[in-house]
Image (cartoon, rainbow, N blue to C red):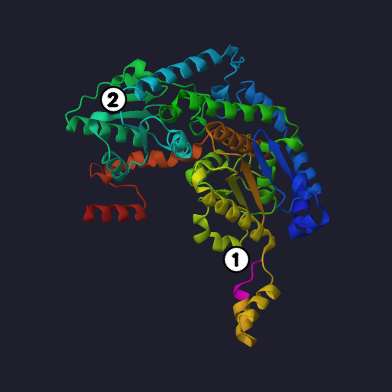
C-alpha cells in the first residue's frame, strides 16, 4: 500500500504550492476541515486532490476505522502488553458503558472522578498556597503543560512540577514554598519510579527538616495503594487508575489532579468535555472530513512520503509553550518504533522528530533554518482568534499577523530577481549586488498547516489534546505498529539502576566499556 504513496511523492515532490492556489480559487476551503470549534487548514502543502485520495486509500487499507472502533470498544489493542487502550473512557462524562473483559469500567471511572473532585475541593479550601506535583514523563508533562495553558482560569493554589532527578529541580522549586502551606502530589503508577520516589523522599525530608509533620501533606496518584501505604500515605489519599491508561495519555484522570486543584472541578470537567467532543467527531466523521485522520495523513505525507524527518510545532500562544514538549513525548514515545505488530521490520521510517517553541520567540531563533536552510521542515502553526487580555488586543493582532505571515513566507519565498530588485533599490550594483541578493533569496514552497481556535479555554484545550492523541493513533495504525507500549525507555533505566552503586563507589566498574569506565573515573576525581 506504500507504493502508491511513493509514486505520489515522486510526482508531487516539486509541486508548486502557490501554483495549486492559482489552479483552484477555492483551495483554502477544499483543503481545510472544521470540527467542533477548530479549523485545520492544510492548503499550504503540496497535497492535491489526487494525493489526498491516495492518502485516504492508505488509511482505509490500514483499517483505521475498524481499529478505532476496537479501541473504543475496549479491545486489547495494546497486544504486546495484553491491555485495552481506554484513556478515552476517562473523559466519557456521558457515562455510556465501556466494556473490558465484559465488565463496564465506567462506574469506577466516574467514582474516581468524584473522589478527585472531593480531594480537589478539600485542598482548595484548606489554606495550602502551593501544590508540588512530583512525577516524570506522562505524570508531569501533561499536567504541567495544561496548568500553564489554562492559567487565566486558575483560582486555586499555585502548582509546581518537579520531574528531574537532578537536585536542582526540587531545590529551586521548594525555595519559593512555605513548608507550612505546601502539599505534595506523588504521581507514579507503580509507586516505584526511581526519579519520582527520590524526589518524594527529598520532599518528605524537607518538611521534617522544617519541623512540619508529614501527615496530610502527601497525596498519591498510583495503582499501587499497598506501596503508597507503606510509604505513609493512607488509602483515602490514594487515587488509582487502571492498566489500560498509558502514562502519556493519563492527565484525563487522577494524574490531572493538580490541574483540577488549580482551575476547579467545573473547569476540569469542561476540559474533559472538550476531549469527549473530539472523541465523538473522530468516531463519527468519514475519513475525508475527519480532522484527526487528516492531521495524521498530512504527517504521513511529509515524513514517510516526502522524507522530511522532523516536524516543528509552533503555537502562537505563550501559554502553550510546553505543548511542543508534550506532543514530543506523545508522538515520539508512541510511534518511535522499528518493528510492526508482528515483530517484522517496518518497511518505512516511523515517526518524525517533533520539536518546537512558541511564536514569536522562535522567529528570532530557529526560523532562519526553516526559511533558508537546506532541509525542509514541515511546520504546524497554531493560534487563537481571541486572547485573554482584551485591553492589550493590539498585542494579539500582532501575534496573529506574525503567525499568518510566517506560513505565507514559507510558501511564497523570495526569488533571486526579487532580491536583486531590493538590492538595486538600495543603490548596489555589479558583483556586490549579486552577492548580497543571493543571501536574501528564500526558496519558498515549504509546507505548513495551521490549526485555529476561537479562544484557548479548558474545553478547547481538551479538544486539541484529544485531536493530537487520535492523530498519533491513526499514524500508528497506518504504520502497523503498537503506539501504546514504550519498551525503548527500559534499557537505559535498567543500566542506570546497575550503575548507581558504581557511581557512589559501592561497587566496582568491572565489565563496563572503556568509555564508561573513563567517565566514571573523571567523576571520582572531581567529586
Could you tell me which residue is drawn at 41 percent across and 37 percent down? Answer: 136
Residue tagged 2: 217
Residue 105 seen by the camera: no
Give the percent coordinates (x, y) of residue 400.
59, 51
Please report the bounds of the magenta region as a residue range: 438-443
Side of 436 relative to 265 (left or right):
right
Q: Quadrant of residue 168?
A: top left
Q: Is residue 118 above or below residue 166?
A: above
Could you tell me which residue is drawn at 43 percent across and 33 percent down? Answer: 154
- Asked whether residue 123 is drawn in magenta, I would say no
- Asked whether residue 442 is drawn in magenta, I would say yes
Give the percent coordinates (x, y) of residue 359.
53, 52
Q: Quadrant of residue 482?
A: top right
Give the percent coordinates (x, y) of residue 177.
27, 36
Q: Is residue 446 above or below residue 345?
A: below
Looking at the picture, tell me which residue is in the foreground, 79 or 113.
Answer: 113
Residue 395 seen by the camera: yes
Residue tagged 1: 372
Give the percent coordinates (x, y) of residue 311.
59, 51
Q: Is residue 437 above or below residue 168?
A: below
Residue 520, which numbered label? Answer: none
Majority secondary structure of the magenta segment?
loop
Could you tell me which residue is drawn at 76 percent across and 38 percent down? Answer: 288
- Of the residues under marks 1 and 2, which one precedes in the sequence? 2
Amino acid at each position: 500500500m506504500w507504493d502508491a504513496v511513493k509514486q505520489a511523492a515522486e510526482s508531487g515532490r516539486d509541486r508548486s504550492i502557490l501554483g495549486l492556489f492559482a489552479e483552484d480559487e477555492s483551495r483554502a476551503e477544499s483543503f481545510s476541515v472544521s470540527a467542533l470549534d477548530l479549523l485545520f487548514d492544510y492548503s499550504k502543502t503540496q497535497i492535491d486532490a489526487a494525493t489526498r485520495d491516495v492518502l485516504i486509500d492508505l488509511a482505509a487499507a490500514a483499517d483505521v476505522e475498524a481499529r478505532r472502533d476496537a479501541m473504543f470498544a475496549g479491545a486489547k489493542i495494546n497486544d504486546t502488553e495484553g491491555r485495552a487502550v481506554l484513556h478515552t473512557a476517562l473523559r466519557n462524562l456521558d457515562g455510556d458503558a465501556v466494556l473490558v473483559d465484559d465488565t463496564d469500567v465506567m462506574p469506577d471511572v466516574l467514582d474516581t472522578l468524584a473522589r478527585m473532585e472531593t480531594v480537589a475541593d478539600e485542598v482548595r479550601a484548606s489554606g495550602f498556597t502551593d501544590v508540588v506535583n512530583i512525577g516524570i514523563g506522562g505524570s508531569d508533562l501533561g499536567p504541567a503543560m495544561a496548568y500553564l495553558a489554562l492559567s487565566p482560569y486558575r483560582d486555586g493554589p499555585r502548582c509546581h512540577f518537579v520531574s528531574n532527578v537532578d537536585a536542582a529541580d526540587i531545590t529551586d522549586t521548594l525555595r519559593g514554598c512555605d513548608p507550612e502551606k505546601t502539599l505534595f502530589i506523588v504521581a507514579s503508577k507503580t509507586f516505584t519510579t526511581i526519579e519520582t520516589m527520590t524526589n518524594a523522599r527529598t520532599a518528605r525530608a524537607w518538611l521534617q527538616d522544617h519541623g512540619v509533620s508529614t501527615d496530610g501533606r502527601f497525596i498519591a496518584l498510583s495503582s499501587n495503594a499497598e506501596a503508597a501505604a507503606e510509604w505513609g500515605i493512607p488509602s483515602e489519599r490514594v487515587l488509582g487508575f487502571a492498566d489500560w491508561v498509558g502514562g502519556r495519555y493519563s492527565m484525563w484522570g487522577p494524574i490531572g489532579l493538580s490541574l483540577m486543584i488549580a482551575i476547579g472541578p467545573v473547569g476540569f470537567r469542561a476540559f474533559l468535555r472538550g476531549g469527549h467532543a473530539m472523541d465523538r467527531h473522530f468516531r463519527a466523521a468519514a475519513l475525508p472530513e475527519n480532522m484527526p485522520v487528516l492531521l495524521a495523513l498530512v504527517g504521513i505525507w511529509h515524513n514517510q512520503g516526502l522524507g522530511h524527518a522532523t516536524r516543528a510545532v509552533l503555537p502562537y500562544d505563550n501559554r502553550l509553550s510546553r505543548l511542543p514538549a508534550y506532543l514530543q513525548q506523545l508522538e515520539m514515545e508512541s510511534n518511535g518504533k522499528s518493528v510492526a505488530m508482528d515483530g517484522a521490520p517496518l518497511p518505512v521510517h516511523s515517526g518524525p522528530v517533533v520539536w518546537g517553541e512558541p511564536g514569536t520567540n522562535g522567529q528570532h531563533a530557529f526560523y532562519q533554518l526553516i526559511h533558508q536552510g537546506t532541509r525542509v521542515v514541515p511546520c504546524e502553526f497554531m493560534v487563537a482568534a481571541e486572547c485573554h487580555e482584551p485591553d492589550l488586543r493590539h498585542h494579539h493582532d500582532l501575534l496573529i499577523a506574525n503567525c499568518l505571515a510566517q506560513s505565507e513566507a514559507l510558501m511564497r519565498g523570495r526569488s533571486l530577481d526579487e532580491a536583486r530588485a531590493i538590492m538595486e533599490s538600495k543603490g548596489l550594483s555589479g558583483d556586490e549586488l549579486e552577492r548580497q541578493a543571493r543571501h536574501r533569496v528564500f526558496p519558498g514552497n515549504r509546507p505548513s498547516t495551521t490549526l485555529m481556535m476561537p479562544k484557548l479555554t479548558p474545553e478547547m484545550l481538551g479538544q486539541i489534546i484529544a485531536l493530537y492523541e487520535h492523530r498519533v493513533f491513526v499514524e500508528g495504525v497506518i504504520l502497523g505498529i503498537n503506539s501504546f507500549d514504550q519498551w525503548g525507555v527500559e534499557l537505559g533505566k535498567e543500566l542506570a539502576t546497575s550503575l548507581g552503586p558504581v557511581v557512589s563507589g559501592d561497587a566496582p566498574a568491572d565489565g563496563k566499556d572503556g568509555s564508561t569506565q573513563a567517565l566514571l573515573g573523571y567523576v571520582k576525581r572531581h567529586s
